[in-house]
Amino acid sequence: MEFYNVKLLPKGLPEIIAQFVPYEYYPDTKVIAYPRKAKGGHLGQLCYGPQIRLYPTMIAFHSHGVGTYSFQLWHHFLKVALHEVGHLATIPLCEGISEGDYEFCWEAHCYVEDLADRWCDQAMARILQVDPRLGQPSGRLTGYPGILAYQRRAGSFKQLDKGRIEEWRAMSCDAQVPLHDIVHCVNHWEPPSDAGILSFLLNSKLTPEQEVELELRNQKRQKSYHQSISKTRRLVHKAASILGITRCYVNRQGKRYLMFNVGEAEAVYKHCLLMGISQEGITEANTVSAENPQFLHDERIVPLKGNSDA
């Protein structure tokens, strides 16, 4: 698999694809990153040749979700690339579908896209099992995504000051996901990433009784949906303490801000999923937070005084 215009892609993306994509899917395949929005709305395309086209401007524009802006960029670039490889890998399953069917038949279009999505999710789950950073190299992003991340850290996007501070904090402690994102995921019962929850389900050793109990907890949670943010934060602190996660950013005043890489974030989310948001869990979490007062101000934004005091 040959990559062209690699400066438009984040560093490490070609290597992680070569490592986790089976060889039979990519001999003589070209991956070309186009420097402009060649086709509006398209993030990537699989063309004859075979040739995979990626449109970095569109991928970056649609990058959003859990984690810092750098991680969102990495996650979305990786997902789009693996999705297009998934189209290549699932061609034998789409032999009866013509190009016209794909363009004009909604059922055929959804079938083809769903196959590629499933292949992509399984590949990302395998990556997460091996690398808790989902393949993202340590340090700063490079290439076109790196320029966007630098602009975020430098404050070019002044309406997103909190995201700018999170970028500096995460870069200083090699993190990807801030605490408040995990609190949101637990509070709204949403997994931090597509790869993590699939990895959890693939490797789940729950008994049928535990699966029924989880379903009942989820139904009960939907009836009383919104939990107090402070209570959920204490529960997340409890889960991180049990799992031995101590990654944090420490500023000049000695305040500690708990942060995670995506593997740690998934582990905390799964732990909270298995515990459930019960009153007993909240009570125990209150005790843990009382014993660890240095984490009580994790969500307080401290004014910037240079790069190291984000």
Image: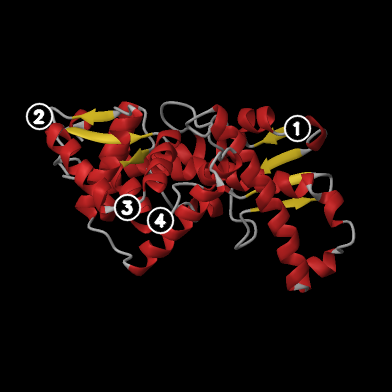
Rendered image quadrant of residue 1: top right
Q: Type of residue at label 1?
A: Pro
Q: Is residue 170 left or right of residue 123?
A: left
Q: Quadrant of the C terminus?
A: top left
What label does residue 189 carry, if any? Answer: 4
Q: Secondary structure at mark 2?
A: loop
Choose mark 4 or mark 3, whichever is in front: 3
Task: Using a 10 Å C-alpha cutoff, classify the residue at mark 1 as few (fewer than 14 neighbours), some (14 to 19) or many (20 or more).
Answer: few
Horizontal and vertical percent for residue 229?
23, 54
Amino acid type, callout 4: Trp
Which callout, 4 or 2, points at the residue further toward the start of the chain? 4
Q: Position of residue 198 (x, y in %)?
A: 57, 45
Q: Amino acid at mark 2?
A: Gln
Give the mark nearest the N terminus, 4 or 3.
4
Residue 17 against residue 113 in the figure, above or below: above
Q: Nearer the viewer, mark 4 or mark 2?
A: 4
Residue 277 is marked as 3
**Amino acid at pointer 3:** Ile
Q: Is residue 75 visible?
A: yes
Label 1, label 4: how many angstroms apart (C-alpha)?
A: 33 Å
Element type where label 3 sits in the image: loop
| Secondary structure of the residue carrying numbered label 1 | loop
Query: Disc 2 marks which residue?
Result: 253
Question: Which residue is denoted by mark 1 in the rendering?
Answer: 22
